[in-house]
């Protein structure tokens, strides 16, 4: 077991089985949070089984160790754990927050989940029904659906597989498919555990070693062959009084040296009521009821994802002005816009310092993308060092020219 400490109080260790542990003690809080990042996301699913990761996530929580579904849920609730599970393209993420004194017992429950899930046959059908109902609900939420389809049409394969799955491929998923997915992907050598809060590093390390030290991978992690997806225009016909618009174009990943310039560009476009998209498209022209841009990324690629919801009559104009604003960012950025970016960033940093859940998640995310942890002080320094010229230089190298466009509504649009 390798162990390292640094002066920022973020302490790390790697168990002999490869499990990476990241701990940030926060003595001024009473809570503790943990964030498990397991390499079992939708990109790792078997062919034609999109949705397997979502099914795996749900089925694992329907009984583990000596506890059935109800007993496991009761045990988690009894410890006051505020738990949340999600699936991304790359990871199955399991997070929880509780009183610091309950962290050890909480980790015992998650040891059962990760090492000893029951996978009982009678719980499989309810799991499948729950995932199916979530997918059917998505069909009734065009605002969410357009962004799912946008990701599918701009991210490289297989990273473009929707983490929620698809109704078309759900029938291909069987209990054996999920058990194989678990055996291959739920493994210590690629797993990351971030912990932050009222904890002692040595005590955490001893507990994790005792609970997870004997965990071993039982199969080969599926190899991922990435294939690019060309920018495209996709229209999904739907009789409605509204049109949903999704636009995407290349940016940079989190690990890139230009990431903070890209973040600032996204923030200037969509960082508040005074941002450019809100001001130019909604406030000045009244073209839409909702509009935003966000920076999204994979390990090796990043994208700017933009959304607008509008009436059918104003959809073409909304798209036109939206693209004008995106492309106009390369003409210049003011000091006032950058100052507002910095103010919003510092507010977010302060709030993240007060949230053990946010810190635990950030530890795991940083290690996943960078192989190291970025301190809050480093983030502040990077943001303070930004200039308007840095942002303009980034935008000119990553312009909104060759965009992917997805629309949902009665009539298609052209870019």
Image (cartoon, rainbow, N blue to C red):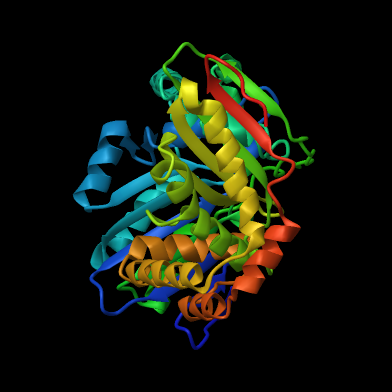
Q: Is residue 329 above or below residue 133?
A: below
Above or below, 252 relative to 345: above
Is 84 situated above or below 5?
above
Residue 361, image quadrant: bottom left
Q: Quadrant of the N terminus?
A: bottom right
Residue at position x 33%, y 73% from top? 199
Comparing 131 with 255, the one in front is 255
Taking the image as drawn, is residue 332 in sight? yes
Residue sitting farthest toward the front:
284
Q: Residue at x 58, y 48 (%)?
A: 325
In the rendered image, the quadrant that contains the C terminus is top right
Residue 253 or 371: which is nearer the viewer?
253
Residue 313 spot, x, y in % from top left:
48, 21
Q: Nearer the viewer, residue 213 or 25?
A: 25
How far across and down, in percent of the image, does residue 50 sit? Answer: 60, 27
Is 134 left or right of 179, judged from the image as shown? Answer: left
346 to the left or right of 315: left
Pinpoint residue 104: horizontal percent, then vertical percent. 33, 63
Front residue of 248/126: it is 248
Q: Residue at x 72, y 30 (%)?
A: 232
Number of dots carrying numbers: 0
Q: Is residue 35 left or right of residue 38?
A: left
In this view, which residue lies farthest toward the bottom?
Answer: 7
Quarter residue 162 falls in: top right
Let me know if residue 93 appears in the view. Answer: no
Please report the residue visible at 32 percent of the width from the left and 32 percent of the height from the top. Answer: 69
Residue 293 percent location from the top left of the image: 52, 47
Depicted 195 relative to depicted 166: above or below: below
Q: Residue furthest top?
A: 239
């Amino acid at each position: 077991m390798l162990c390292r400490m640094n002066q920022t109080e973020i302490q790390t260790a790697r168990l002999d089985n490869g499990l990476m542990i990241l701990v940030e003690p926060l003595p001024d809080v009473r809570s503790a949070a943990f964030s498990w990042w397991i390499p079992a996301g939708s990109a790792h699913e078997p062919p034609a089984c999109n949705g397997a990761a979502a099914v795996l996530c749900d089925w694992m929580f329907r009984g583990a160790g000596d506890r059935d579904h109800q007993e496991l849920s009761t045990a988690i609730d009894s410890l006051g754990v505020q738990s949340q599970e999600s699936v991304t393209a790359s990871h199955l993420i399991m997070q929880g927050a509780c009183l610091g004194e309950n962290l050890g017992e909480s980790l015992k429950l998650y040891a059962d989940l990760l090492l000893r899930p029951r996978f009982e046959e009678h719980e499989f059908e309810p799991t499948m029904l729950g995932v199916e109902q979530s997918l059917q609900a998505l069909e009734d939420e065009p605002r969410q659906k357009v962004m799912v389809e946008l990701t599918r049409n701009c991210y490289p394969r297989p990273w473009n597989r929707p983490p929620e799955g698809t109704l078309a491929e759900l029938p291909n998923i069987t209990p054996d498919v999920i058990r194989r997915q678990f055996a291959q992907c739920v493994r210590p050598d690629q797993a990351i555990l971030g912990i932050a809060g009222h904890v002692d590093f040595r005590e955490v390390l001893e507990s994790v070693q005792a609970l997870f030290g004997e965990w071993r991978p039982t199969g080969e992690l599926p190899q991922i062959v990435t294939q690019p997806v060309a920018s495209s225009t996709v229209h999904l016909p739907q009789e409605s009084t509204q049109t949903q618009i999704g636009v995407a174009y290349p940016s940079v990943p989190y690990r890139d040296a230009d990431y903070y310039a890209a973040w600032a560009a996204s923030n200037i476009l969509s960082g508040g009521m005074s941002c450019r998209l809100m001001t130019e498209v909604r406030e000045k022209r009244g073209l839409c009821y909702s509009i935003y841009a966000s920076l999204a990324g994979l390990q090796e690629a990043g994208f700017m994802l933009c959304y607008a919801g509008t009436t059918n009559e104003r959809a073409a104009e909304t798209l036109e002005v939206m693209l004008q604003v995106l492309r106009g960012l390369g003409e210049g950025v003011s000091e006032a816009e950058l100052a507002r970016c910095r103010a919003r960033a510092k507010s977010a940093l302060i709030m993240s310092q007060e949230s053990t859940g946010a810190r635990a998640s950030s530890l795991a995310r940083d290690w996943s993308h960078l192989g190291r942890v970025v301190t809050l002080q480093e983030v502040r320094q990077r943001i303070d060092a930004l200039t308007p010229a840095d942002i303009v230089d980034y935008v000119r190298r990553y312009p909104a020219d060759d965009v992917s466009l997805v629309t949902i509504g009665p009539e298609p649009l052209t870019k």
